[in-house]
């Protein structure tokens, strides 16, 4: 019995610790939805100068409690992040049910780091408008402190909500509020 | 009785062998190997050839913006962007982690060199294919920028 366990441990060590998984073939290829994603992630701001949009973008990220990690005004790049709660009521309920059934609770999502990258540039062929594109990622940690998810965020409603706030920030900046 | 003793000693020996294998596995594959810090599988010339492309432009800012747009298309988040040094670093998360660094520098009077290197889950990507895919995506982005298609 002990030998069987040791064989199992040996196999697990070899499989999990020493063999790295291969790079997915599609990792550096544009996804079939990349154009749709770009459309969802981009907004044009008419009659707004690039520098004003960049300032408004920094302002709205601060409004939302993000810490700026990187900025480059000439390239129009802003990267920011913040930690938020990742608790999901359904997941917690599921964990409680599992605990009742088998006597030990499964880990659930606990907190997450949201990383955003905003790139602002002048409208192509239109000096009177500017474009802002935001991309979002998240890293989720569970109650055991392990990373349970690391992914791009593609929920359209989040992008819509952000651009609504950015539009408001553009207005506030323009009126020096 | 002798048979039982023999069986017992065979089991003990097998156990010892297995324990040794586990320890050997940990020691050989999971220990730090700083001596490999500057080792390369391919020659420097080979690595540079598949990681680098020359572009017929002198507009560094335009090319950097194209690189950033391509990285966004490929779902990367920009970690660092330095226009003076011509460096962009970015990370992609998709159940795995890819960290990429792109540098842009002048080549002669008419060209800029774009060099990309990437790590997949902390290991350097040494297969030329992913770099070809990246430059194919960058060429599309440059095409879009040049032709004002959005």
Image (cartoon, helix red, strand yellow):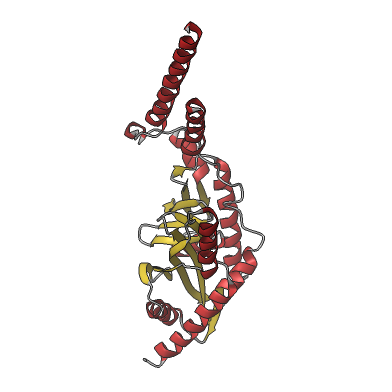
Q: Vertically, is B27 above or below B5? A: below
Task: Classify the position of the C terminus of chain A by image quarter.
Answer: bottom left
Please tell me which residue is depicted at 46% across the width and 61% down the height of the picture.
Answer: A140
Please tell me which residue is depicted at 50% across the width and 67% down the height of the picture.
Answer: A136
Which residue is outermost to the top?
B2
Q: Vertically, is A110 above or below A9? A: below
Rendered location of residue A47, percent (x, y): 51, 87
Q: Is residue B59 visible?
A: no
Rendered location of residue B74, percent (x, y): 56, 58
Please tell me which residue is depicted at 45% across the width and 59% down the height of the picture.
Answer: A142
Which residue is outermost to the front?
B1
Rendered location of residue A16, percent (x, y): 49, 39
Q: A116 or B56: which is nearer to us? A: A116
Which residue is outermost to the right?
A32
Q: Vertically, is B146 above or below B34? A: below
Q: B128 or A117: which is nearer to us? A: A117
Residue B19 picture quarter = top left
Q: Is residue B51 visible?
A: yes
Rendered location of residue A119, percent (x, y): 47, 70
Please tell me which residue is depicted at 55% across the width and 63% down the height of the picture.
Answer: A94
Total numbered circles: 0
Q: Vertically, is A142 above or below B39? A: below
């Amino acid at each position: 019995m002990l030998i069987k366990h040791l064989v199992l441990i040996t196999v697990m060590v070899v499989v999990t610790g020493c063999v790295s998984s291969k790079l997915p073939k599609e990792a550096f290829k544009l996804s079939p939805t990349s154009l749709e994603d770009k459309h969802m992630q981009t907004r044009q701001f008419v009659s707004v100068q690039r520098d004003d949009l960049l300032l408004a973008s920094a302002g709205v990220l601060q409004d939302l409690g993000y810490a700026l990690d990187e900025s480059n005004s000439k390239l129009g790049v802003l990267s920011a992040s913040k930690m938020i709660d990742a608790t999901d009521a359904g997941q917690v309920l599921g964990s409680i049910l599992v605990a009742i059934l088998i006597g030990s609770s499964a880990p659930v999502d606990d907190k997450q780091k949201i990383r955003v990258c905003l790139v602002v540039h002048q409208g192509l062929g239109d000096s009177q408008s500017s474009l802002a594109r935001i991309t979002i990622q998240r890293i989720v940690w569970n109650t055991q402190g392990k990373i349970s998810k690391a992914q791009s965020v593609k929920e359209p409603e989040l992008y819509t909500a952000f651009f609504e706030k950015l539009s408001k920030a553009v207005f506030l900046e323009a009126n020096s509020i | 009785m002798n048979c039982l003793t023999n069986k017992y000693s065979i089991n003990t020996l097998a156990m010892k062998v297995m324990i040794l294998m586990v320890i050997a596995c940990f020691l050989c594959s999971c220990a730090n190997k700083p001596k490999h810090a500057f080792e390369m599988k391919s020659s420097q010339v080979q690595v540079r050839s598949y990681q680098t492309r020359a572009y017929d432009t002198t507009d560094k800012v335009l090319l950097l913006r194209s690189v950033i747009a391509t990285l966004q298309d490929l779902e990367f988040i920009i970690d660092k962007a330095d226009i003076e040094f011509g460096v962009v670093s970015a990370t992609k998360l998709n159940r795995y982690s890819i960290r990429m660094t792109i540098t842009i520098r002048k080549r002669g009077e008419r060209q800029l060199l774009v060099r990309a290197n990437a790590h997949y889950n902390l290991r350097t990507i040494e297969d030329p294919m992913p770099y070809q895919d990246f430059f194919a995506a960058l060429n599309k982005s440059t095409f879009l920028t040049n032709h004002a298609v959005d």
